[in-house]
Amino acid sequence: MTLKDIELIFSRAWQKALQKKKCLFLFGFLLLCGIFVVMCHTLGAMSGIWVKLIMYFLPGFLVSGILLALGVFFARIYYNEVKGVEFSYREVLSKSFRLLINVTQVSLPFVMSYLIIWMLMGIFYLLREIPYIGESIGLILSFAPFVLALSSLFLAVLCLFTLFFATPYIAFKQFDDSHFIPSSLHFFKAHVFSHLLLFLIGVLPLIFTLLLLIASASIAQAGLIEIKSPIKSGMQWFFMMIPFTAALTPIVLFFFNFSVESFYLIKKTASASESI
């Protein structure tokens, strides 16, 4: 794997991400996911710190299952486009429908893991409220919120990593095969550096765009249309979600396209090294 190989797959993934039909198809789903996240964040803004934690993180883990199903669908479309195979969206969807339904279950471990972290955080807040000794216990266990918050962020990164590399594995291998997970983990361990490098390249445009969009929306709310009511703020985000999602759509398509390219590039590199 050389820099020229990475440049080639990056350019091809980006070119295929700017197709109008795919962008319109994905835009609708991303808009629905975005509205769901905004609703949860609005409820969280009107609640206490403990409820805020679950409203800020859990919607992302729930949406990740839908995004993974969309990723598998677009991965198969991208494969047919690159190979020059004639296809229709309806045909790909009908052949993949059962798989797309089952693949949403991949998000369940992330949801359950975060619920455990959230309950542990609740126990900490509960102990801190004990009369007389609660403040002392809170001081002694002050490391607990840090560890739990770090665990939540690590879980979010792991979820994003899974979206990137599980998508092509699921799209082009037997997801219901009992050896699917062990073989996937073995292949990842054998090429850790390549996986991490390509993941960073693929995810940087997504993170940069998200930060830019969130910063722009926050500045607009704070400086131009400042409203302190959580409900009105949520309504603003509801309407801002339309251009927000539109700008994010080709970046998400690139993310999934590049995941397919990375999958085959690592396989190609592995085959070449074994033949030497």
Image: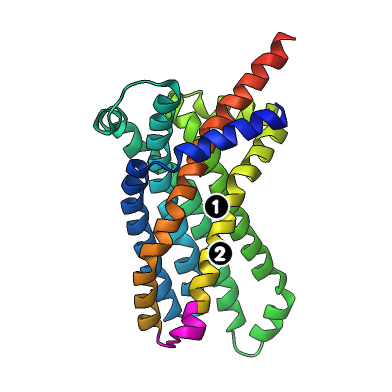
Residue at position x 72%, y 16% in the image: 273
User: Where residue 94 appears, x then y in whole percent?
Assistant: 25, 30
The residue pinned by badge 2 equals 212
Report the magenta residues as a range.
220-229
Q: Is residue 69 magenta?
A: no
Q: Is residue 115 left or right of residue 28?
A: right
Spatial separation of the CA atoms under disc 2 and disc 1: 10 Å
Q: Is residue 14 left or right of residue 1?
A: left
Residue 108 in view in this figure: no
Q: What amino acid type is highlighted by mark number 1?
A: Leu
Q: Secondary structure at mark 1?
A: helix
Residue nearest the observer in this picture, 75 or 6: 6
Residue at position x 37%, y 46% in the image: 23
User: Where residue 9 appears, x then y in whole percent?
Assistant: 58, 32
Please state, as top left, top right, bottom left or bottom right, where the N terminus lies in the image: top right
Q: What amino acid type is highlighted by mark number 2?
A: Leu
